[in-house]
Image: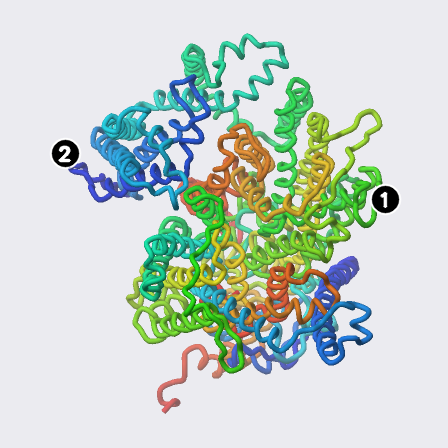
Amino acid sequence: MSLLEIRDLKITFGGLDALSGLNFHVDEGEIVSVIGPNGAGKTTFFNAISGLVPPTEGEIEFEGESIVGLDPSIVTSLGIARTFQNVRLFPNMTILENVMVAQHCRTNQLLVGALLQTKAFKKEEREIRERAEEVLGFFGHRLVGYRMDQPAFALSYANRRRLEIARAMATQPRMLLLDEPVAGMNPIETAELTELIGRLRTEWGFTIVVIEHDMKVVRDVSDRVVVLDHGVPIAQGSYDEVSTDPNVIEAYLGRPVEAAS
Amino acid sequence: MSAHAVSTKSARGLVAVDRFLTFIRVFLVTMIVVGILAFIWQQIDADNVFARWRNPNARGLTGDQFKGLLISGLSQGSMYGLIALGYSMVYGVLGFINFAHGEVFMVGAMTGFIASDKFQANGMWEQNFLLCLVLIVLMAIFFSTFTAVVMERVAYRPLRNSPRLIPLITSIGVSFFIQNLVLGLFGPASKSYPRLPEWLAKQRSILTFEIAGTRLMVLVVAAVSMAILWYVVERTKTGRAMRAVAEDKEIASLMGIDVNRTIVTTFAIGGAMAGVGGILWGLMFRSVTHMTGFLPGVKAFTSAVVGGIGNMGGAMAGGISLGSAESIAPMLILEPLGVPGVSQLKDAVAFTVLVLVLLFKPSGLFGERLSSEDRA
Amino acid sequence: MSVIAAPVPSSILDQDWRKVLRWGLICGGALIAMCLVGMPVEMDRRAIIERYLSLGYLTVLFIPVLVGWVASTQVVLEGVEARKQGPFDLVTGFVVGAIGGGFLALLMVALDSWNLRDPLVNWSPKLFRFLTYENGMGFGAVAWIVTGAVLGLVGASFHIVPRTVRRVTSFVVFGLISLSILESLIDDLSEGFRLEWLDEFMFAKKGGLTVTSTIVIGAAIGVLSLVTDGRMKAATERYRNMEGVERQKTSIVLFVVIAVLCGVLPMFLGKIMNELLANVGLFLLLALGLNIVVGLAGLLDLGYVAFFAVGGYTTAVLTSPNSPWFAPELHFGIALIFVVIFATITGLVIGAPVIRMRGDYLAIVTLGFGEIIRLLFMSDWLGPYFGGAQGVTNIPGVDLGFATVKGTDPRSVFYLVLFFCAIAIYVSWRLQASRLGRAWMAIREDEQVAEAMGINTVSAKLMAFVVGAVLASFSGAVLAAKVGSVFPTSFMILVSIIILVVVIVGGMGNIAGVMVGSFVLIGVLGGPKQPGLLQEFQNFKLLIYGLLLVFMMLKRPEGLVPSARRSRELHQEEFLQDAWLQDDKLDSDDEVSVGDGGAEEQ
């Protein structure tokens, strides 16, 4: 059974089909890339999975259970975490807090614990903190130490992207949705993050879906590539298959002149 | 494992809130329906079982009473509509609630009082009422517009790009300030407008409706102002600029529209309408204080929301609906349910309408028109 | 980065006259508005320095100084080197002040020639006498123009004089003014401590500082300001930079000191001052609750007074023998349990429908709810249960076994309030650093992302509403026990707005800020019905509250005592620029490490 199964997904905004007839599945432990030209509906696809946009038609199943119509918070607590294309951290919370708050759905102390400072509360706080530090430590020394108490907006661009991934990891998901994780990074940083994405699978056991424009990254990380164009999947398969597919080339480069006429 | 346990728990939390909201919706609608049914029953048979249980003294309404309520609701509602235009336009363009707009209205009413009081003192009020009326309307428009424009320049322009709630809080401060400035300048006593001349104020009968001249005048002036406004917004260059700025400020400025000037114009037009509304209010209720702006202001905002914020026709329609609802609903719905002293609950009815609209159709009855960044 | 120098004016008369005129008009307009609102005349009754300076004149004189200072402030542009300020700016201030004074002179002429008493209630001979210093008009006119000009000049000169001078003068002036404002408090305290001689030395019989004490105290403050120069700042810096445990220790010491002060001080205070403190405490309690709702969770609740009312009425109905419908005459402590229950229910009922609305709609709808609750308590419908406009009277005090807390003994009320405030402070403090507090902050920052990160925003927001509601209802309960009666008019929307002002002026999201806010505003200016130290401000305090709210939002949205987080949020751009400049080092640091990583790979 595949971890995520999407059938005939269709999303319409004011009469315009952002996605139509999308069939898609992700197996446990896979890394799948979703590529496609701008406006192909990739981010809408992520929004639909994470519950931010309700699908017009179709079915989304996670571990065999439908997650259509569930609140985003519940989707996350079921084990799907995501990052955002336009980095959306909690800018005025510290780096540590950003990662701590993401463990909300895995913890359950409320008013009473905090007010009475019960043993359970203290234990949980300690665990939250430890887990946060562990997750941040995954990115080397960049997000730990004195940096942990800095506000998130003071971070450099690449570090904000890393923090966003850390935040998603902290929700303890089974599946990670990464929306253009290397956008705006320089080649060295990109290479490093590519390697980290691989390690996210091997060391943390996440199943990963990546939206990416950088073909080098796509080639290096993915087991399978799905190409979207105008909300429709036009090709699926390994990187080599997809990259030579004439439909894909056409979608990216446009129809050759003679063919169009 | 634990993940699932937690998720079902939080899911239950959500469901509880939703159930409660559904309960509120159903409860309110049931009350309204039961009230109306009870009212109809009571009209047919004043001594029915339900009436004996809930409201033995009820007499129901005669046709004339009902028409009277309707007329008073309409005329009051058209004033809410005039004020609501200001809220709606500013919300459409800047995306924040100008809480102080009610005070702009109050400034208009106050100006009208001062001017008409002076006119009456030298006898002009009786001799040449129409001229006086035009003069006080112009003066009220001038001062209201001035207040609105100064407000924009001093308090709101510097905050144009700040988080949404900041200008709202500022406008609460502005509202407080203007109220108390007027209190300090003109004192706390309630000021009464001079009486309208008899030829205007007398009862008339139009299409079987008995209507007081004052109310008729209110309806006419409101309709005329609305028509002028419609012409300005739909047919002139300024109006086009306003609509463009409301849609997208950045692109409008790229198209060569002076965004600042357009926003000032928006405030000015809203202020002028509120000024007219203020005069009408004064002529109708004949009493003005520094607090006059508060309740009509909040209700006008309610009207704007009811009609769909950013939508000008909607604001007027919303005003009229709210005015009628608040004038008729207490007698129509609350009294048959056996609530005593219903006329005191007029204001509560208005707020309930606001909650109802936001629960059922947050975008208002006629749809919102907001710029892209405010739609979220 | 090339730096352009700002253009240097060729002569001191080469002014931007339009700007000068504009500020002159603002100055004159402010002065005239103030006079016509009646501020100076009414405040003339309060002396600052014996019979030489009254609060009335002080408020008028203060305007040209302020406007002169603002008008001559240089507009600093990015990348432009500031011009050294000099005589040129003095001229600006001088002219602005003179124009302002000129307006007062004109007002005087107008007062003399026409009678506009009809619409303008303060158009009175009293105002004329005030403006002319009881002399002829000619003298008054000249005097005002000259004073205005000189004061404007003084204001402008603040840009020029050395920092130390500026510091000492402002310390002395503000110190003297605050001492004079605190007169009744000091009176009371010195009586309590048997230090009457100090009081007699400081204050004249008819109020205000004596001339000798002005000189002596002024000198003392001046010296003090010189001595402490820089140390205060260093101390706060040090405190800010402390590490976890050490900071906590210092905080606890500070807290204990304040707690002891709060516990001991009232013993030495008289009735009036204790009453004042009790009022401050009541509003502090409300403000702390609102701070959780607005400051932490970012929900602008304008109907906060509803919970205050629920607390008050629940206590009234359950404890008073005069309750018209159901009078179990419970003990306050037991009633309190029900207060908590009802506040929670009200919080949920009001919260549930509004929780999914846009922030600004939430504000107006809660305002509506606040008003509905008051209207309901007032109406004939619920009148039989809650007494309608007559309210519920004869509420007994709180019987604690060893003492009774009653309105007639404000000291006991203060202790009761203090107890609840302590609870509220503890609650706010603990929640801030908890799972729930972090969730609130995340919701305030970006609700959609918070939801996508697994936070159940609906229940978290409801929780904020409920915690706020319970704290407000405590305040209502204490109010009922203190005053002995509750009326619908005690729960006007005004209360909500005033608490909002307190929270915002003090500093949103910051407990210390809220405390400072309520002491300064409620203590000095007074609450909606309760007088503060400056009783002369009674009629103008709402005006000032409004002005303060606007001013704070425009100039200092983070409040007087900002929380570090909040101020970052509101000045993000500036902070980012600084961070960016500092980050040069950090970034290069980064590059190295990444380079290392790359090298290892190969």
Q: Which is in the foreground here, disc 1 or disc 2?
A: 1
Quadrant assignment, res B4: bottom right
Residue receiving disc 2: C11
**In the picture, which quadrant includes the N terminus of chain C?**
top left
Identify which residue, A108 or C395, lies in the foreground: C395
Quadrant assignment, res A5: bottom right
Do the residues indicated by labels 1 and 2 lie within the same chain of the protein? Answer: yes
Identify which residue, B216 or C375, lies in the foreground: B216
Judge from the rendering whether residue C135 lies leftward or rightward of residue C309; answer left or right.
Answer: left
Give the chain of mark 2.
Answer: C
The type of colouring in the image is rainbow
Q: Residues within 10 Å of mark 2 (few under 14, many from 20)?
A: few
Task: Indicate which disc residue C213 carries.
Answer: none
Q: Is residue C233 visible?
A: yes
> What amino acid is labelled 2 in the image?
Ser
| Residue farthest to the bottom, as pictured | A261
Residue receiving disc 1: C328
- Residue at 81%, 44% (x, y): give it: C318
Judge from the rendering whether residue A181 lies leftward or rightward of residue B250; answer left or right.
Answer: right
